[in-house]
Image (cartoon, rainbow, N blue to C red):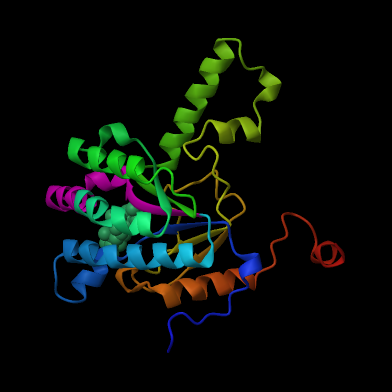
């Protein structure tokens, strides 16, 4: 099958897709390999899905790469993941530039190992003028952390007298989240069969369509992405209204 074939309506493309890339460990285990073998293979899916999104015209792609809870994994796995990030970021800058993709990160970057943070900041700097798509890596990210930080920022502005109580609303909250300036994801994909959010973009996913697939992340490819977007396009997004209202609009 031609993997470029799809039935996606390009006029109704989600602007922002967010993905919980899950199942690397189980993918490796099912091949009698160590977990980190799965992470290494997961990089190919990152490349393929990123390129596919850019080719389609998706404007923002957020990938959950490491949660604050993932620090609790065995030390060897955490260290390997952090090294893999450095290698991947260095290797993929050319691909990002070739595809006119700019890199961004959300999460508490101050807690990342120095080498990982450096590679990340270099990647962000080297791609900052690219404009076709934004690739946002959620790294040492957790939604509860992000929301607490957001509340702190708002509290400071209120205490300083630069923000009135009645101006604390959705717009104000969005401006103080890590995702400032980024529209909410319309589609959230999670691979590996788990059906949970795992502390990912809790606020921003308020009205996202959730898509769960049994496919493990290292097996998630272009065709699987197309299937998820096609499924998204079959849904009726009502935003609280009735189906009739939408049909008559
Ligand atoms: C996702 O795969 C990658 C990260 C969380 C970094 P997992 O490593 O969670 O794989 P499973 O869920 O154990 O199979
Ligand atoms: C979520 O996957 C985090 C990332 C994909 C980076 P996990 O595998 O850590 O999630 P849980 O712990 O199974 O919910
Ligand atoms: Mg997992």
Give the residue at the far top of this rendering.
160
Above or below, 5 against 114 in this view is below
Instruction: Estimate the x, y position of residue 78 in percent, counting from the top left.
Output: 19, 49
Instruction: Estimate the x, y position of residue 18 in percent, counting from the top left.
Output: 47, 56
Choose top left, top right, bottom left or bottom right for residue 10. bottom right
In magenta segment, residue 20: no
Q: Is residue 34 left or right of residue 7?
A: left
* Residue 5 in view (yes/no): yes
Q: Is residue 116 left or right of residue 9?
A: left
Above or below, 192 against 88 in this view is below
Q: Residue at x 34, y 35 (%)?
A: 108
Instruction: Estimate the x, y position of residue 190 in percent, counting from the top left.
Output: 43, 63
The number of numbered badges drawn on the structure is 0
Residue 97 or residue 157, whichever sits in front: 97
* Residue 191 in view (yes/no): no
Ligand 2 sits in quadrant? bottom left
Tell me the quarter of the image containing the N terminus: bottom left
Instruction: Estimate the x, y position of residue 71 in percent, counting from the top left.
Output: 24, 44
Q: Residue at x 21, y 52 (%)?
A: 81
In magenta segment, residue 69: yes
Q: Residue at x 15, y 48 (%)?
A: 79
Give the residues in magenta: 60-85
Tell me the quarter of the image containing the C terminus: bottom right
Q: Residue at x 36, y 54 (%)?
A: 97
Q: Is residue 59 left or right of residue 65?
A: right
């Amino acid at each position: 099958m031609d993997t470029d074939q799809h039935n996606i309506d390009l006029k109704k493309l989600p602007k922002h897709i967010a993905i919980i890339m899950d199942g690397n460990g189980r993918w490796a285990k099912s091949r009698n390999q160590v977990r980190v073998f799965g992470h290494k293979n997961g990089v190919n899916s990152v490349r393929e899905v990123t390129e596919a999104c850019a080719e389609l015209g998706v404007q923002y792609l957020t990938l959950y790469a490491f949660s604050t809870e993932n620090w609790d994994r065995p030390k060897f796995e955490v260290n390997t993941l952090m090294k893999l990030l450095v290698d991947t970021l260095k290797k993929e800058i050319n691909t990002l530039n070739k595809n006119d993709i700019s890199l961004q990160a959300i999460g508490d970057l101050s807690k990342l190992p120095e080498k990982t943070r450096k590679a990340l900041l270099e990647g962000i700097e080297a791609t900052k003028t690219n404009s076709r798509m934004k690739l946002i890596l959620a790294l040492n990210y957790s939604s509860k952390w992000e929301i607490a930080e957001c509340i702190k920022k708002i509290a400071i502005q209120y205490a300083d007298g630069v923000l009135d109580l009645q101006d604390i609303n959705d717009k104000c909250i969005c401006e103080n989240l890590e995702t400032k300036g980024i529209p909410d994801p319309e589609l959230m994909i999670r691979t590996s069969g788990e059906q949970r959010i795992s502390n990912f973009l809790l606020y921003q996913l308020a009205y996202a369509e959730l898509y769960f697939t049994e496919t493990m992340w290292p097996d998630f490819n272009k065709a699987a992405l197309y299937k998820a977007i096609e499924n998204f396009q079959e849904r009726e997004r009502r935003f609280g209204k009735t189906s009739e209202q939408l049909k008559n609009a």
